Image (cartoon, rainbow, N blue to C red):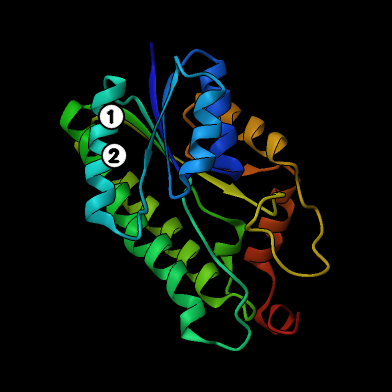
Amino acid sequence: MKRALVIGASSGMGREFAQRLADAGWRVGVVGRRETLLLEVVRRDPDRLFYCRADISRPKDAVAGLERLVDRIGGMDLCILAAGTGDLNPTLDFAGEEPAILTNVWGWTAVADWACGYFEDRGSGHLAVITSVGGLRGSGAAPAYNASKAYQINYVEGLRQRIAKSHSRIAVTEIRPGLVATEMAKGDGLFWVMPVEKAVRQALHGLYRRRKLVVVTRRWRIIAWLLRHLPDRLYLGL
């Protein structure tokens, strides 16, 4: 039986990933901050789903919990790092930026490094991380969120280069969603907000094929291309 760890599984895409993997026969460890929601996930299939409450913004305690959960499920073939946070902060109040920095950069890095090290010790495995199309450009409304996602995109490329030089059988997949109907989709006038189920279904399709990058949903590839190529004078005026 294949074994997966889904970090950030109490809601949103992480929760959908965990449920779909369990339905496909995987033994799945789910991790998140909100124990009540984790218990809801586990009750769906207690023979295949197991949980650990952890907050990755406290990396030392979180990694210790992840190690215990991996032992409990008998190992780890796949790690999906779906934990993240972010909020609109047009006033540039640092208290509004701090959670995104602590979670999406500080804690995220600790967990990504831990998972990569676990797979390197075994010579194989699959690390999948959820970034964001927002990481392609800065945001005046949510500066820390977009910047933290840009950090993740760059960090994943660094991990991929490291693994390529080691010639190990480790895959790294970046799942780069556009707007998905989760708690993270904030603001007025949002468009092309995709259902969680559709986004995860398409992401799993690419993940099972061990692709390096999966932009979900497919129509968001158009937006991603436009963001990369839009001149500054036009983008800054949006």
Residue at 46% over, 84% down: 94
User: Residue type at mark 1?
Assistant: Val
Residue 102, picture quadrant: bottom left
Q: In the rendering, at what x and y percent does residue 141 appear? A: 64, 78
Relative to residue 13, is residue 238 drawn left or right?
A: right
Q: How many marks?
A: 2
Do labels 2 and 1 touch, CB within 8 Å? Answer: yes
Residue at 24% over, 30% down: 168
Disc 1 element = helix
| Residue linked to disc 2 | 66
| Residue linked to disc 1 | 70
When the figure is inspected, residue 24 is found, relative to residue 150, above or below; the finding is above
Residue at 55% over, 66% down: 86
Q: Which residue is nearer to you in this view: 15 or 197?
A: 15
Residue at 46% over, 50% down: 83
Q: Which residue is nearer to you in this view: 21 or 219?
A: 21
When the figure is inspected, residue 88 is found, relative to residue 60, above or below; the finding is below
User: Residue type at mark 2?
Assistant: Leu
Circle 2 crowding by C-alpha within 10 Å: few under 14, some 14–19, many from 20: many
User: Where the C terminus falls, by quadrant?
Assistant: bottom right
